[in-house]
Image (cartoon, rainbow, N blue to C red):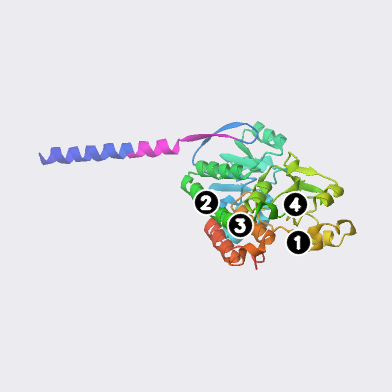
C-alpha cells in the first residue's frame, strides 16, 4: 500500500511537472501581431529576446529590457538618459535609421528590428534581408501611448506600459489643473519652430497635442498639416506671445532676438523665445517637455508648484535615473 501511494505520488508529481513545462512552452511560444506605421502586419514571437532598436531606444530603461537588446542606433550613445547606464557600452552600434548597416544587424541574429517609418525604403531593404521589422513614428500623444502598449506586448511588460501611461496622464492633469483658470480670450499664442524659423507646427502632431495640454493656442493650426513652411510675413501677422524652438535646431533664441526682421513680434519684444531641452519626445520625456512648456508659457500659474521637483520625481519613476541638469534649475 505504501509502495502504491508512493508510486501514485510520483506519478502525480510527474504529471504536474509535464503540465508546468507545457504551460511554460506555450507562454514562450505566444505571438502578437503588430500593424506598424507603414501598414505592415508583423507577427512576432514574444517575449522578444534579441531586439535591434534603431528607434525607441529611450524605452530601454523605462521597461528595463537591457538584456533583450543586442544592437542600437549609433545616436543612442549620445542619449543623456542611456549614457547613465554602464550597460550601454556593451551593445554594438549598427548605423542609424537612415544609414543602416544591414550586415552588422544580420550578424546579431535579431528576433526583431524596430526603426523609423520615414524611410520606407530602408524598411523594405531590411525585410528583403529576411529580418522582422516594425516601423514606427508616434506623431500624436495617442500614437505614443500605442507605442508604449506595443513595447509592453513585445517584451511582456504590459503592466509597465499601463503604469507609465497612467503616470504621464497624472502629470498632464497637474498641468491642466494649473492653467484651468485662464479664460479662453487670455490664452497665449504659442508658435513652435523647427529646422528653420519659418517651419512651424500646424494642426496635427505630438507638439500640437502638447500646446493644447498646456492651455495655449497655436495660430498655425489653421494649416491642416503636421508641419509647414510659412512666410515670415505670416509669422509677423500671427504675432505669437511665446515661441519655442526645436531643441536640435541649428539656431537659438539669440538669432531671432537679434534679428531686425522679427522685432515687431510680441514674443521677441518680451523676450519670450525658448529653445527646447534635448529630451526625446518619443518616450516618457514628453511629460517633462510638456511641464517645461507650460511653465515657460504661464509662469504665473506655477508659482506654488515646485516644477523642478515634480519633473525630477517623474523622471526618476519613468527612467530610474535622474533628470539632466539645467532644464528647470
Q: Earlier in the sequence, mark 1 or mark 4?
A: 4
Q: Residue at x 63, y 62 (%)?
A: 301
Can you say whether 75 is above or below 326 in the image?
A: above
| Image marks 1 and 4: residues in contact by CB distance under 8 Å | no
| Image marks 3 and 4: residues in contact by CB distance under 8 Å | no
The answer to whether any part of residue 6 appears in the image is yes
Residue at which label 3 appears = 181
Instruction: Give residue 25's position: percent from left, percent from top.
Output: 40, 37
Residue at which label 1 appears = 272
Instruction: Give residue 147's position: percent from left, percent from top.
Output: 58, 43
Residue at which label 4 appears = 191
- Frontmost of labels 3 and 1 is 3
At numbered mark 1, what does the secondary structure look like: helix, strand or loop? loop
Residue stretch rendered in magenta on the structure: 20-35
* Disc 4 crowd, CA 10 A, few/some/many (<14, 14-19, 20+): many
Work out which quarter of the rendered image holds the C terminus and state it: bottom right
Q: CA distance from mark 3 to mark 4?
A: 22 Å
Q: Horizontal placement of 281 versus 271: left or right?
A: left
Q: CA distance from mark 3 to mark 2?
A: 28 Å
Q: CA distance from mark 3 to mark 1?
A: 21 Å
Q: Residue at x 59, y 43 (%)?
A: 142
| Image marks 3 and 2: residues in contact by CB distance under 8 Å | no
Q: Residue at x 30, y 40 (%)?
A: 17
Q: Earlier in the sequence, mark 1 or mark 2?
A: 2
Amino acid at each position: 500500500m505504501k509502495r502504491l501511494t508512493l508510486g501514485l505520488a510520483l506519478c502525480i508529481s510527474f504529471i504536474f511537472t509535464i503540465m508546468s513545462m507545457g504551460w511554460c512552452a506555450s507562454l514562450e511560444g505566444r505571438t502578437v501581431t503588430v500593424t506598424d506605421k507603414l501598414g505592415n502586419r508583423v507577427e512576432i514571437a514574444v517575449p522578444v529576446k534579441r531586439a535591434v532598436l534603431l528607434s525607441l531606444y529611450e524605452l530601454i530603461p523605462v521597461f528595463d529590457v537591457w538584456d533583450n537588446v543586442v544592437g542600437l542606433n549609433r545616436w543612442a550613445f549620445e542619449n543623456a538618459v542611456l549614457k547613465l547606464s554602464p550597460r550601454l557600452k556593451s551593445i554594438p552600434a549598427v548605423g542609424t535609421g537612415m544609414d543602416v548597416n544591414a550586415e552588422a544587424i544580420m550578424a546579431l541574429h535579431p528576433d526583431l528590428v524596430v526603426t523609423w517609418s520615414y524611410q520606407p525604403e530602408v524598411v523594405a531593404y531590411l525585410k528583403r534581408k529576411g529580418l522582422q521589422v516594425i516601423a514606427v513614428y508616434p506623431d500624436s500623444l495617442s500614437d505614443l501611448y500605442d507605442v508604449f502598449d506595443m513595447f509592453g506586448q513585445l517584451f511582456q511588460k504590459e503592466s509597465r506600459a499601463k503604469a507609465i501611461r497612467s503616470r504621464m496622464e497624472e502629470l498632464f492633469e497637474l498641468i491642466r489643473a494649473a492653467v484651468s483658470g485662464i479664460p479662453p480670450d487670455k490664452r497665449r499664442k504659442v508658435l513652435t519652430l523647427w529646422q528653420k524659423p519659418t517651419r512651424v507646427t500646424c494642426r496635427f502632431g505630438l507638439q500640437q497635442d502638447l500646446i493644447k495640454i498646456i492651455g495655449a493656442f497655436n495660430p498655425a493650426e489653421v494649416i491642416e498639416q503636421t508641419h509647414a513652411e510659412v512666410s515670415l510675413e505670416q509669422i509677423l501677422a500671427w504675432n505669437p506671445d511665446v515661441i519655442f524652438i526645436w531643441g536640435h535646431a541649428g539656431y537659438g533664441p539669440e538669432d531671432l532676438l537679434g534679428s531686425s526682421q522679427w522685432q515687431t513680434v510680441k514674443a521677441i519684444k518680451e523676450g519670450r523665445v525658448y529653445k527646447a531641452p534635448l529630451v526625446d519626445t518619443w518616450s516618457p520625456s514628453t511629460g517633462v517637455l510638456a511641464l517645461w512648456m507650460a511653465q515657460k508659457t504661464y509662469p504665473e500659474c506655477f508659482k506654488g508648484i515646485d516644477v523642478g521637483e515634480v519633473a525630477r520625481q517623474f523622471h526618476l519613476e519613468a527612467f530610474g535615473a535622474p533628470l539632466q541638469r539645467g532644464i528647470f534649475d
